[in-house]
Image (cartoon, coloured by chain):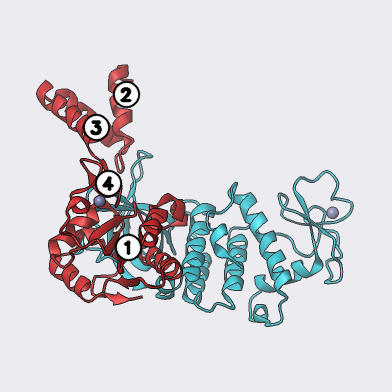
Chain colours: A red, B cyan
């Protein structure tokens, strides 16, 4: 067994996704060998991101204030909402330059087998935004995976019921099935965006 | 260990690190496999985005034995079958997730059950028929019990083998959820978790458990169907030690 501080570092690192016991040990020893400056820089970066970055109060994208830069930007079209699974999915959509509206980040995809029920996602907040009025279109840009499609089906059904006048669209097919939006190239994603269809 | 090639259904996927994915697969020849697929989230990965939940692929697995925390490694996956109805219809999707949940919860790693794999694929292929869907699911539940050696006794007392009156007219048959089957009057006292079933419920169970097409009978009373599904659910919940996560989503 290691001294308690080393053991503590190993067990904290081991909580990260995809890090097993052995990898956690390797990382811990790497940190032990690092210069104090490097090790403190890592500790500071973790503390800083937790202190300064939170979720946008409107769309739940990452934000360094109460609102993200997109929600704070008055030039963005407030009548169109693009729904994505994760904050990481906003960036590829932005890169296509096809979308001038605002976002709504669900925080994942609906998947009861993984313990993700509608209440675990920012779905009620999406309904509240749409029902508050002023929205003409909701673009469902969840991943073209089985759970992403199921999430889109769930949202489309509920939005038609709650806000019959709002157009609900889904990205055009063309994205490889089973893929992650985050890794889509911008030409393909841009084309899928431009060709979006009502559902 | 040499790499093994087998056909497999994806029952769980968890994204890890930058681009990798940890998959739980129910394979025909190896049973349940938990494996790491490096780079699986990239569009141009060797897995060609085939490793999506509830898709069937031909995979190559590199078994890692040794330290208990090392996962098997997936080196190849080629998509064989994907079920469009699971992406077009929520009820089908949830029924598909339930099939995956049962396979994941009830089977052990590297314990193969090829017939159960085949039953899962046939069930997933036909979930788009709304009328037969609940009964297809029930047939799959029974296939799980049968293939895993957990099929409840539906004719004779599970304890002593004595004949039990399980005729359709008898509406008070004792059924031990923990002991796994019907109980005669002599064996019933002192047994834990005993439910009272109707002979009709047992008949529906029997018909859905047997080969052939008699389960498709269109005249099944919806109440009998609901009672039977409830009984099966109680048996499976007992085996899993928890309520299946998909139950609230299955409807009737
Ligand atoms: Zn925002
Ligand atoms: Zn008996």
Name the disc covering residue A61, or none. Answer: none
Disc 2 target residue: A8
Q: Residue at x 19, y 68 (%)?
A: A189
Q: Which residue is mark 4?
A: A56
Distance between mark 1 and mark 2 Cα atoms: 35 Å
Can marks 2 and 4 be said to lie on one chain? Answer: yes
Q: Is residue B168 left or right of residue A189?
A: right
Give the quarter of the image for residue A145. Answer: bottom left
Horizontal relation, residue B196 to residue A142: left or right: right
Picture residue at 21% right of the left edge, 71% below the top:
A193
Q: Which element is circle 4 on? A: loop
Report, in whole angstroms, how far the alpha carbon at label 1 lies from the one at label 4: 32 Å
The percent coordinates of residue B93 (x first, y second) are: 46, 67
The front one of B163 and B92 is B92
| Mark 4 C-beta to ligand 1 under 8 Å | yes
Q: Chain of mark 4?
A: A
Q: Residues within 10 Å of mark 3 (few under 14, many from 20)?
A: few
Mark 2–mark 4 distance (CA, rounded to whole Å): 33 Å
Which residue, given by chain and number where applicable, does mark 1 sit on? B51
Question: Residue at label 3?
Answer: A51
Residue at 22%, 40% in the rendered image = A65
Viewer-proximal residue among A147 and B35: A147
């Amino acid at each position: 067994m290691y001294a308690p501080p080393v053991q503590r570092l190993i067990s904290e690192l081991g909580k990260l996704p995809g890090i097993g016991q052995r990898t956690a040990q390797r990382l811990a020893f790497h940190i032990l060998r690092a210069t104090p400056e490097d090790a403190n820089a890592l500790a500071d970066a973790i503390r800083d991101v937790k202190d300064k970055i939170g979720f946008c109060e409107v769309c739940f994208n990452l934000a360094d204030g109460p609102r993200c830069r997109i929600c704070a930007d008055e030039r963005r079209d407030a009548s169109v909402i693009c729904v994505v699974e994760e904050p990481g999915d906003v960036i590829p959509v932005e890169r296509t330059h096809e979308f001038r509206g605002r976002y709504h980040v669900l925080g994942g995809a609906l998947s009861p087998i993984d313990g993700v029920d509608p209440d675990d996602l920012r779905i009620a907040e999406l309904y509240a935004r749409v029902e508050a009025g002023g929205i003409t279109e909701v673009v469902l840009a969840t991943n073209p995976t089985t759970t992403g499609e199921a999430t889109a089906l769930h949202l489309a059904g509920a939005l038609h019921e709650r806000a019959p006048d709002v157009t609900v669209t889904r990205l055009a097919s063309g994205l490889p099935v089973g893929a992650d939006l985050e890794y889509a190239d911008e030409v393909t994603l841009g084309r899928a965006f431009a060709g979006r269809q009502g559902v | 260990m040499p790499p093994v090639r087998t056909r497999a259904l994806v029952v769980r996927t968890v994204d890890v690190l930058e681009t990798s994915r940890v998959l739980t697969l129910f394979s025909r020849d190896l049973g349940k496999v938990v494996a790491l697929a490096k780079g699986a989230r990239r569009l141009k990965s060797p897995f060609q985005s085939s490793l999506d939940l509830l898709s069937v692929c031909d995979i190559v697995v590199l078994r890692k034995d040794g330290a208990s925390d090392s996962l098997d490694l997936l080196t190849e996956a080629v998509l064989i079958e994907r079920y469009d109805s699971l992406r077009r219809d929520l009820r089908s999707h949830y029924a598909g997730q339930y099939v995956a949940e049962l396979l994941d919860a009830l089977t052990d790693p590297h314990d193969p059950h090829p017939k159960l794999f085949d039953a899962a694929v046939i069930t997933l292929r036909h979930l788009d028929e709304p009328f037969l869907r609940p009964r297809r699911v029930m047939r799959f539940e029974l296939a799980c019990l049968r293939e895993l050696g957990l099929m409840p006794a539906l004719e004779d007392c599970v304890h002593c083998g004595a004949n039990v009156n399980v005729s359709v007219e008898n509406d008070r048959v004792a059924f031990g959820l923990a002991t796994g089957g019907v109980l005669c009057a002599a064996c019933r006292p002192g047994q834990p978790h005993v439910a009272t079933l109707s002979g009709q419920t047992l008949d529906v169970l029997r018909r859905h458990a047997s080969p052939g097409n008699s389960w498709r009978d269109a005249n099944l009373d919806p109440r009998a169907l609901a009672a039977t599904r409830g009984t099966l659910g109680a048996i499976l919940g007992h085996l899993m030690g928890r309520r299946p996560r998909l139950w609230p989503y299955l409807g009737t």
